[in-house]
Amino acid sequence: MRTRLLPLLIVLMAGVLLALGIPLGVITAGVEQQRVVVDRIDDAARFASLAQFVTARPDADAATKSPDEDERCATLGAELARYYDLYGIRAGVFYRDHTPMARAPQALPVPDEGEGAQAFSEALAGRRSHDPRQIWPWDTDGRIPVASPVIRDGDVVAVVVTDSPTGQLRSRILHGWLLIAAGECAAMLVAVAAAFRLTGWVLRPVRVLDVASHDIATGRMKSRVAATAGPPELRRLARSFNEMADNVEEVLEQQRAFVADASHQLRNPLAALLLRIELLALELPEGNEEIASVRTEGKRLASVLDDLLDLALAEHAPADLQLTDVAALAVERVDSWRPLADDKGVRLTYEGHTAVTGWADPVALSSALDAVVDNALKFTPAGEPVTVDVAPDGERVRITVADRGPGLTDDELARVGDRFWRSSRHQNISGSGLGLSITRALLAAGGATIAYAPHPPHGLQVTVTVPRSAP
């Protein structure tokens, strides 16, 4: 679940950071450019104040010039030249007819197109030029023109024009963007770490609930959840889960107790009934079919009651887990069943490792193997093999019992192991339908599992797995 929830949180946080970072970057660029524009306006205003005292044209007749006219014009030109040398900013003062009063460099023309021409026209009208378009770091050929009117006696007599390069401005904008990007990356790392912690805090109770649910589903009814971590909703869910598990365990315990008590209480009357049937058989002719049928059904009922009692005990009794040589135990059970297999003409063999250890209840595992081998011998015809194999499989030990009987269909495989279930094709074979249910209960108590699968070309393969590590 974390792999689905975490990317969603990261995408949302990245979207929020981008939504904040992009406007911040635009604002930063605008602030940097506005600072440059304000400086150019101040510079243009200073040059305009100097130009106010230069009224004569450079080509005017000497008789019309005042004594200080040439000195003032030379001062203005020197200021413009020094300004250009220091900052690399071109600047000039032009009369209304575009004749230069002073300029640096000397080849600086009057802007006749673009933003420069518009700024010049606005200055001629007595207005400060509008803000130039925004410069971005990739605008390598962009420039910032600023124009300011020179006013004398209420009239615009000239215009100061500055034409600034944008290299330093673009560098400052890029530097500001890099700082913003670094801050966003740091914020993203913090957000990802917080998302990890948040998803872990939220999902940890869910994982615990999942494990506890699996434990209860596999028969470990004592599993519970500590309702002390996670959001309040999950803590309430954990408490509800514990209450549900308590109720389920109580109901199952009552069911097991009822089955055990009923089986135990019925055994004595049934034993007395069977004894009276045997006494009655002594009074009837030898080979009476009705007495033989009653005797058979009575023994079958006794077997069912014994199996019910065994099932109730298997579901209730705790497992005595020990480090067990599973291979040696399987060899022992195969040797015990081989005489019966030989009588039926079935080849019962062991194929597997000589020594494989696992954690299991030896008594329960022996009983489970007996039930599986007995089931295989029942359905395997004479001349066919039944093989038992033990092998390690990662963290578990795999015990495989394969026969060459008729096998089961897919629908039957889904039901095998259910209580009292028997295949409709095998009703003529003795059994109560509880043997594999008892086997599953015995194995589940120790953390082992049992599975059923076809054994091509025909037959059934039963696989019992036992954990290799201590519980």
Image (spheres, rainbow, N blue to C red):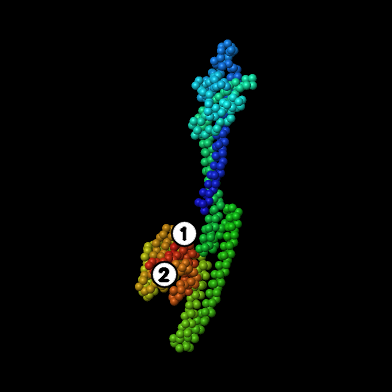
* Residue 439 in view in this figure: no
* Residue farthest toward the front in the current orientation of the protein: 97
Mark 1 element type: loop
Q: Which amino acid does label 1 sit on?
A: Ala
Choose between 470 and 144: the one closer to the eye.
144
* Residue farthest toward the right in the current orientation of the protein: 154
Q: Which amino acid does label 2 sit on?
A: Gly
Query: Looking at the image, which residue is at 46% across and 73% down?
Result: 424
Pinpoint residue 327: horizontal percent, then vertical percent. 40, 64
Q: In this view, does 111 lie to the left or right of 337?
A: right
Indicate whether 195 appears above or below 408: above
Mark 2 element type: loop
Q: In which quarter of the image is residue 430?
A: bottom left
- How packed mark 2 is, by other alpha carbons closer than 10 Å (few <14, some 14-19, many 20 or more), is many
Pinpoint residue 138: horizontal percent, then vertical percent. 49, 34
Indicate whether 429 appears above or below 158: below
The residue wearing badge 1 is 470
Query: Looking at the image, which residue is at 41% across and 59% down?
Result: 393
* Residue farthest toward the left in the current orientation of the protein: 383
Query: Looking at the image, which residue is at 53% across and 29% down?
Result: 114
Choose between 4 and 359: the one closer to the eye.
4
Choose between 129 and 401: the one closer to the eye.
129
Pinpoint residue 390: horizontal percent, then vertical percent. 40, 63
Choose between 124 and 206: the one closer to the eye.
124
* Residue 13 in view in this figure: yes
The residue wearing badge 2 is 407
Q: In which quarter of the image is residue 342?
A: bottom left
Rounded to the nearest angstrom, the CA distance separating label 2 from label 1 is: 35 Å
Indicate whether 359 appears above or below 8: below
Pinpoint residue 152: horizontal percent, then vertical percent. 62, 20
